[in-house]
Image: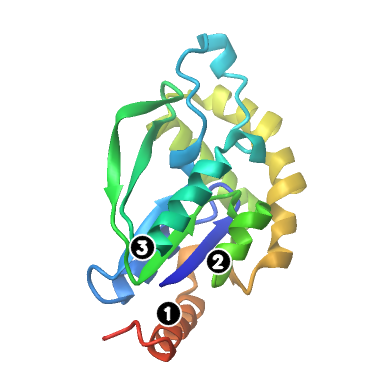
Amino acid sequence: MLIIGIAGGSGSGKTTVVNKIVNALPKDSVAVISQDSYYFDNGELSLEEKLKINFDHPNSIEWPLLIDHLHQLQQGQSIEMPIYSYVNCARAIETQAVNPKRVIIVEGILILTSPKIRKLLNVKLFVSTDSDERLMRIIRRDIQERGRNYNDALQHYAAFVKPMHQQFIEPTKLFADVIIPQGGENKVAIEMVVSRIKLNLDQNNIYDG
């Protein structure tokens, strides 16, 4: 099993990179674990309290559960990954079954901030995108998917996203094996990463493509 970590700032294009890697590898050979699924359940908080949640701080993640799930996958066991909603800041009653695959991709803005997670990763990627481009994507996403209006999205970016990116996320570039500039638009970098993944799988006799 090859475990790949994909980190990068909010709105950097991580999801696009993940999808392109998945599509380039054999069908049903990849499972994707999202860091966002492991935010603590804050459904019981008031609306005012929910607006103050800092989703960009490492303490917002239930790391022990994520680490335990990765260990289970390594041991060939299926897991029940939480389903998290940004709208109500809570985990759903339902979960998403994830089966062990030859490649496990763990993606999220804070993935490389955890030393224990880093030790589990065979390949560490950091998606780097211009801050102005990320801001536009964040505003669009917050309005369309997270129930915020334009002013709320800007205030959230200024209060949480930008300072946390500078303090916690940008420094984790130092832990990355590969930095992918321009996110999903960087076809050359993604092709190189995919080629390396296939080579690693072949060398470990776990790639039959």
Q: Secondary structure at mark 2?
A: loop
Closer to the N terminus: mark 1 or mark 3? Answer: 3
Residue drawn 34% across and 63% down? 76
Q: Secondary structure at mark 1?
A: helix
Q: Position of residue 14 (x, y in %)?
A: 48, 57
Q: Position of residue 12 (x, y in %)?
A: 54, 54
The quadrant holding residue 155 is top right
Q: Which amino acid type is marked by label 1? A: Val
Residue underneath mark 1: 194
Q: Which amino acid type is marked by label 2? A: Leu
Marks 2 and 1, Cα distance to the nearest angstrom?
16 Å
Residue underneath mark 2: 121
Residue underneath mark 3: 19
Compared across the picture, whether 205 is left or right of 200 comes to left
Q: Which amino acid type is marked by label 3? A: Asn
- Tell us which disc is closer to us: 2 or 1: 2
Compared across the picture, whether 206 is left or right of 2 comes to left
Residue drawn 46% across and 85% down? 200
Q: Residues within 10 Å of mark 1 (few under 14, many from 20)?
A: some
Closer to the N terminus: mark 2 or mark 1? Answer: 2
Closer to the N terminus: mark 3 or mark 2? Answer: 3
Marks 3 and 2, Cα distance to the nearest angstrom?
19 Å
Residue 112 visible within the image: no
